[in-house]
Amino acid sequence: MMDLQLLIDLHKNNDRQGPGGDAETRLAIELSKLDKSAPLRIADIGCGTGASTLVLAQDLAADITAVDFLPEFLEALKTRAAGAGVADRISTLSCPMESLPFGDGDFDVLWSEGAIYNMGFEKGVAGWNRYLKVGGVLVVSEITWTTSSRPSELQKHWDAEYPEIDVASSKISILEKNGYSPIGYFVLPEHCWFDNYYRPMQKGFQRFLDRHDNSKEARAVVEAEEREIELYEKYGRHYSYGVYVARKCG
């Protein structure tokens, strides 16, 4: 089985495919100063199985386009949305985030939690800008250094995994350079990593291995995830996801 299919199987039944939390999504909504009663158009890009999408649909009077390139995740989102009673306000789109079929100024809000790294932060915020109305809001979470220096083991890992990792001031500068005015920022707390993402995933490791007959490929997937968890347990004070809230300038 291809590594991608193994990763889909590991993550598709989880509430989240990355660190985050409902309370933190709601904090970003508050920082954005969105009118909760307005008929907003929102694109949730890289939505996974819909953790942030459901909060947006529950808290805002919005029509939401939930975008992910994996149809399996979108099917899980549809099931969850129906169960939450918000399916009528969510449409799904299976599409790479690098080639979105949207028009200029189509959306009031662009939302992307824990996903823009797939495209790269600067390429993403620059490329998506045209889909947002002037005065519209961009909310993205991005892996971010939270200290000015860090252990070499950790630096080497992230230099290999995602060379764009940087401190918040650098990310804010990129937003300003690409037509946005930053209006809010906060760092995801530890429980968003452990309680909401890592521990639920770990509970499913043995069932995942059993489904795949404890194959070498499946064990490699679990070992890679365990390595990432170990690094956060050792060095989590040096990095997290930063949540960036910005408005598109005129």
Image (cartoon, helix red, strand yellow):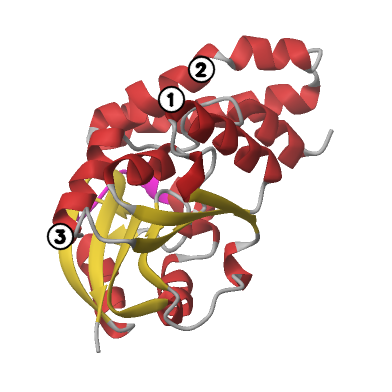
Helix, strand or loop at mark 3: loop
Is residue 199 magenta-colored?
no
Say which label, 3 or 1, has the lower sequence index. Answer: 3
Helix, strand or loop at mark 1: helix
The amino acid at mark 2 is Gln
The residue under label 2 is 202
Asked if residue 165 shows in the view, the reply is yes
Q: Nearer the viewer, residue 14 or 54?
A: 54
Q: Position of residue 96 (x, y in %)?
A: 64, 62
Q: Are the residues flagged by discs 2 and 1 in contact, CB closer than 8 Å?
A: yes
Q: Residue sitting at 55 percent across and 52 percent down?
A: 91
Q: Position of residue 63 (x, y in %)?
A: 42, 56
Is residue 151 magenta-colored?
yes
Q: Callout 3: few (<14), some (14-19), or many (20+) C-alpha neighbours within 10 Å?
A: few
Q: Position of residue 61 (x, y in %)?
A: 31, 52
Relative vertical location of residue 53 with respect to residue 31 in this rendering, above or below? above
Q: Are the residues flagged by discs 2 and 3 in contact, CB closer than 8 Å?
A: no
The residue under label 1 is 198
The amino acid at mark 1 is Tyr
Q: In the picture, which quadrant includes the C terminus?
A: bottom left
Q: Nearer the viewer, residue 45 or 182?
A: 45
Say which label, 2 or 3, has the lower sequence index. Answer: 3
Is residue 4 found left or right of 223 in the rendered image?
right
The numbered dot on residue 33 is 3
Give the magenta range: 148-156
Q: Callout 1: few (<14), some (14-19), or many (20+) C-alpha neighbours within 10 Å?
A: many
Is residue 195 found left or right of 97 in the rendered image?
left
Relative vertical location of residue 98 with respect to residue 103 in this rendering, above or below? above
Q: What distance separates the C-alpha of mark 2 from that of mark 3?
A: 36 Å
